[in-house]
Image: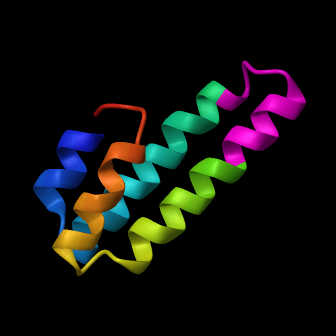
């Protein structure tokens, strides 16, 4: 995911697709976690996703967020 976001940074349409893929992948992982841990991870992912989407057209801003992503595509 980090690689894909780095490649797509600055292109809002591609970033939207990347973020949706990220959410879908994490959703699978959350189903396998205890509820309290899943809630925490869901909130962290949504916070990161919101920041990425808000900065989608700003390549430098997206690149600053990439290290916070923990899944690869």
The span picked out in magenta is: 30-42
At x 88% / y 33%, what residue is drawn?
A: 36
Q: Residue furthest right?
A: 36
| Residue 50 in picture, x, y percent from top left | 52, 69
Residue shown at 17%/53% (left/top)?
Answer: 6
Asked if residue 58 is positioned above or below residue 3 in the image, the reply reads: below
On the image, the x and y values in percent for residue 72 come to: 31, 31
Please tell me which residue is depicted at 68% across the width and 39% down the height of the picture: 41
Q: Position of residue 73 (x, y in %)?
A: 28, 34
Res 55 → quadrant? bottom left
Most frequent secondary structure within the magenta stretch: helix
Q: Is residue 36 magenta?
A: yes
Q: Is residue 70 left or right of residue 66?
A: right
Residue at the (35%, 57%) spot, across then down = 65
Query: Where, by quadrant of the figure, is residue 47 drawn?
Result: bottom right
Magenta segment includes 65 = no
Whole-percent x and y of residue 31? 73, 26
Q: Is residue 23 left or right of residue 11?
A: right
- Colour mapping: rainbow
Measured along the vertical axis of the image, is residue 11 above or below residue 2?
below
How many discs mark residues in the rendered view? 0
């Amino acid at each position: 995911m980090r690689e894909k976001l780095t490649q797509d940074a600055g292109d809002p349409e591609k970033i939207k697709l990347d973020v949706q893929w990220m959410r879908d992948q994490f959703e699978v992982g959350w189903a396998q976690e205890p509820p309290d841990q899943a809630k925490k991870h869901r909130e962290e992912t949504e916070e990161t996703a919101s920041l990425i989407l808000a900065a989608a057209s700003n390549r430098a801003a997206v690149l600053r967020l990439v290290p916070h992503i923990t899944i690869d595509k």
